[in-house]
Amino acid sequence: MREILSPKFVENETKPGRYGDGGSLYLLIKPGGHKTWVFRWRDRVTKKLRDKGLGPYGKRDVTLSKARDLAGVCREQVRDGGDPIAITRELRADAIAAYKNLYSFKDCATRYIDTHKAGWRNKKHTAQWTSSLNKYADPLMKLPVNEITTDHVLRCLELIWTTKTETATRVRQRIENVLGWATVRKYRTGDNPARWKGHLDQLLPSPAKLKKIKHRPALDYHQAYEFMVKLRAVNSQAAHAIELQILTASRPGETVGARWSEFDLDNKTWVIPAERMKANIAHTIPLSAQAVNLLKRLTKISDLVFPGRTLEQPMTTAAGMKLLKRIEPGITAHG
């Protein structure tokens, strides 16, 4: 096969027309100077000449050398009885089908969780994400993410929106996050069907209007004196932990997880590090004289103020709940 065109000619020629290189490869220069490559062959069935575009000419697009390689592939397809245009369409259709089927909602949810769990505060949060989506977003799991619509999302939410409003709100947010991640990764396009503002808020009642706030049972502050008398009569770690919690207005988990290194008894402060705080921000608590005296009375047998059975793990909050049920039934430590 004799090649006619040269790289210099292809680069410099501007006159509109079709310039053959041999082997059914042509350089097509259109009015205006745009250059593109074409493979021309005669269809064995219809006997008509047909053109298949091979891409635009350019040093960053299709060079003369690359065009010759592409034309060679087309010639081989024609020799085998194939249709280069149809073959390209089939390959594209197969790729699209594989793209759709490869990235299901379940695939994306799993990858989203794997990507973000390192930044979550504990393993419990990861487990909650997984279990809530498996339970309430099950209809979405096998669907390709780029086929999920508002109707699909509503089918998951409507069943629990009024009966389990808080759970439904979290599920919606998690679905939105997964689909948002899939969009950024280019696994889907278009608006997020789980978006609340300006979308689902037009189809579902506001959670604030549905949510019935139920406070945890708490001690009436008028009964605080009598309760403290009963609490201080109990000489146990659980009792000491509850007393410190009351004196510092801290959460049960923050209290039982306290370490001696967090306390400065001389300056009467307790600094809870960010990783132990719900808001992930370090929190400084001023200590009253009663709190300092309580801490000074405790025996240091571990870096933990309230160690559990192994001394390396803190006492559980369940111990305090058990004590409260015995000395003051009907209230909770968190309340």
Image (spheres, rainbow, N blue to C red):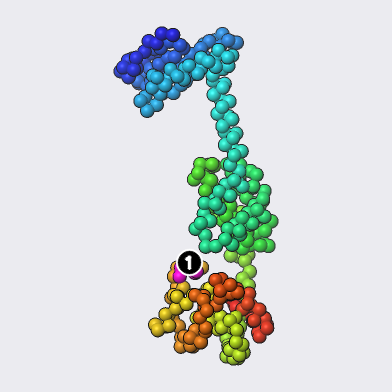
Q: Nearer the viewer, residue 182 or 2?
A: 2
Q: Position of residue 1 (x, y in %)?
A: 44, 8
- At a point 58% along the width and 81% down the height, the residue shown is 237
- At a point 34% along the width and 14% down the height, the residue shown is 6
**Res 261 quadrant in image:** bottom left
Residue, disc 1: 275
For disc 1, the neighbor class at 10 Å (few under 14, some 14 to 19, many from 20) is few
Q: Is residue 240 left or right of residue 262?
A: right
Q: Can residue 183 be seen in this snapshot?
A: yes
Q: In the image, which residues are magenta? A: 273-277
Q: Is residue 304 above or below residue 226?
A: above
Q: Can residue 176 be seen in this snapshot?
A: no
Residue 182 inside the magenta-drawn segment:
no
**Res 12 quadrant in image:** top left
Q: Position of residue 314 (x, y in %)?
A: 56, 73
Mark 1, secondary structure of its residue: helix
Residue 275 inside the magenta-drawn segment:
yes
Q: Nearer the viewer, residue 173 or 77?
A: 77
